[in-house]
Image (cartoon, rainbow, N blue to C red):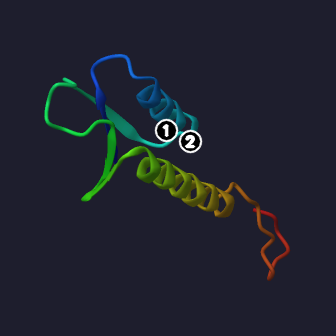
Amino acid sequence: MIAFHRPDTDDPYSDQIKEKLEEMVVAHNVHRHDPSADEKLPYCRENDRIFSGKQEIEQYLQELERELREQRMVTSDSCYIDPETGEIC
């Protein structure tokens, strides 16, 4: 699961990241933090990997989108013809 950590205040860039995650229909949780904390916000965490900074987050989101697209291309509701009987499933 992806954890998206963002400031608790209005932040247009954090809004863009959240919108992108929702657009990709990827499971994620949003965690809001006090911007005065020592954390560098926003950032994404996936398992043990953390992606922070605009360039790193953008690269991560592009890679994630590519991976999801590939997964969704190979998983589909398909019907096959049984080669032995000729029956359609």
From the image, tell me which residue sits under label 1. Answer: 21
Front one among 34 and 32: 34
Inspect the image, locate mark 1, and give the three-letter code of the amino acid beneath it: Leu
Residue 38 vs 50, above or below: the answer is above
Q: Residue at x 82, y 77 (%)?
A: 85
Labels 2 and 1 touching (C-beta < 8 A): yes
The three-letter amino acid code for the residue at tag 2 is Met
Q: Position of residue 86 (x, y in %)?
A: 85, 74
Residue at point 43%, 44% (across, down):
54
Q: Which mark is residue 24?
A: 2
Which residue corresponds to the image point at 14% horizontal and 36% vertical from the top-left? Answer: 38
Is residue 3 visible from the viewing direction of this image? no
Q: Compared to 70, does 85 lie above or below?
A: below
Give the CA separation, mark 2 to mark 1. 5 Å
Where's the C terminus, which quadrant?
A: bottom right
Residue neighbourhood size for the residue with mark 2, other residues' Cα within 10 Å, grouped as few (<14), some (14–19), many (≥20): few
Q: Residue furthest left?
A: 38
| Position in image of residue 6 (x %, y %) | 31, 31
